[in-house]
Amino acid sequence: MSKFATFAAAFAVMLLSSSVAMAQDTAAAVAPTSWIDLGGAFGAGLVVIGAAAGIGRLAGSALESMARQPEVAGSIQTAMIIAAALIEGFTFYALFICSTQIH
C-alpha cells in the first residue's frame, strides 16, 4: 500500500470517529460533533490556502516587476504591502465566519 493510500485511510478513520471522540458525557451536552461542523473547518482551510496563494503570487509579481524597473521599486513595494494587508484582512474575516460554524 502506498504512503498516500495509508494516509488517506488514516484520515478517513479520523474523520469518521471524530463525533464519537468529541462527544461529552454530561446530560446537558448539545448534539455531538457532526458532518455539519466539517464544513466550517473545510472552509477555514480553503481560506488559508487561498490567502497564501494570493499573497505568494502578489509578492512574486511585485519582485519580478521591481527587478525589471528598479527605479519604481518603492511605489511597487507600497502597493504590494497595501494589497497584502487587504488580503490578510479579508482572510481574518473569512476565518472568523468559518470559526463560528465550528462548535
Image (cartoon, helix red, strand yellow):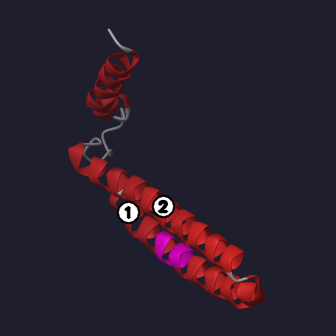
Q: Position of residue 50 (x, y in %)?
A: 43, 62
Question: Of marks 1 and 2, which one's residue comes earlier in the chain?
Answer: 2
Residue 88 part of the magenta segment: yes
Cβ–Cβ below 8 Å for labels 1 and 2? no
Q: Residue at x 69, y 87 (%)?
A: 78
Query: In the picture, residue 27 is in which quadrant?
Result: top left
Q: Position of residue 44 (x, y in %)?
A: 41, 57
Q: Nearer the viewer, mark 1 or mark 2?
A: 2
Q: Is residue 36 found left or right of 98 in the rendered image?
A: left
Q: Return the residue nearer the eye: 15 or 59.
A: 59
Q: Main secondary structure of the magenta part?
A: helix
Q: Secondary structure at mark 1?
A: helix
Q: Residue at x 55, y 68 (%)?
A: 55
Task: Examine the rendered structure and indicate whether residue 83 appears above or below residue 46.
Answer: below
Q: Is residue 95 found left or right of 58 in the rendered image?
A: left
Please, what is the three-letter code of the amino acid marked with disc 1?
Answer: Cys
Q: Position of residue 6 (x, y in %)?
A: 35, 16
Residue linked to disc 2: 53
Q: Label for residue 98? A: 1
**Viewer can see residue 103:** no
Viewport quadrant of the N terminus: top left
Mark 1 and mark 2: span between their CA atoms? 19 Å
Please, what is the three-letter code of the amino acid marked with disc 2?
Answer: Ala
- The residue range painted magenta reads 87-91
Query: In the picture, residue 3 is in which quadrant?
Result: top left
